[in-house]
Amino acid sequence: MDTLSEGFVEKTWQQIAKFTPVRANKEMIAMGKNQPDLLAFLMAYTDDLQQEVKELAIYIAFVVYRMFLDSSGKIPRISSKEIMARHNETTRLMESLEGAHEKFIDRIANVQVSQQPYVMKYVLEALMEDAEEDGIDLTEEDIGSLFMLFMTEIEVLDKRA
């Protein structure tokens, strides 16, 4: 998939932020019908987090999903096998960076997120700013875990959309 523009990413999250609770619920149900394995992965992956952190994560994940859906019109169903393969690759990459020099890590990060930099920018801003604005206390462990979750989601959606 082509890189989603910064304007498109911004327009999408702003539209979703205006959803009523009823519409947001309907849209989440539609996501669950269209991508049941992805939604199950997101729910399972966030299950151990504090409720407010989990809610923020699911909201951000939904916005990311809609960015890809709205840009492509339809996303073929993503299997749990695809999701877990991507997640395992991301985990291996992150583990291989433990103890690496900061400049090397920056270079790897730029390559890894270069396909969808504006989606990743949204994720990081939403994690840091929304959590702070909403009084959600994200630990470094929460941030690292959610970063892995969103990297996995973005990569599988980018591949299939």
Image: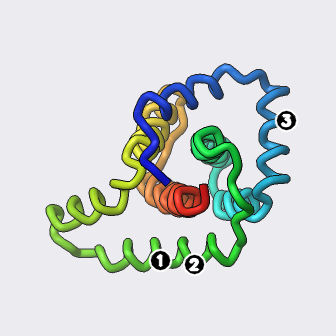
Q: Amino acid at mark 2?
A: Ala
Comparing 160 with 125, the one in front is 160
Label 3 sits on what residue type? Lys
Figure label count:
3
Q: Earlier in the sequence, mark 2 or mark 3?
A: 3
Would residue 17 be visible to someone looking at this image? yes
Question: Residue 134: x, y in percent?
Answer: 55, 28
Instruction: Answer left or right for 103 relative to 137.
Output: left
User: Label 2: which residue?
Assistant: 85
- Dots 2, 1 in contact, CB < 8 A: yes
Q: Is residue 128 visible?
A: no
- The relative height of residue 32 versus residue 44 in the rendered view (above or below) is above
Question: Is the residue 80 above or below the residue 36 in the image?
Answer: below
Disc assigned to residue 26 = 3
Residue at figure coordinates x 75%, y 62% from the top left? 40
Q: Is residue 99 above or below residue 137?
A: below
Q: Which residue is mark 1?
A: 89
> How far apart in space, not on screen, are marks 1 and 3 (Cα)?
33 Å
**CA–CA distance in space, label 2 to label 1:** 6 Å
**SS class, disc 1:** helix
Identify which residue is drawn at 70% across, 49% down: 74
Q: Secondary structure at mark 3?
A: helix
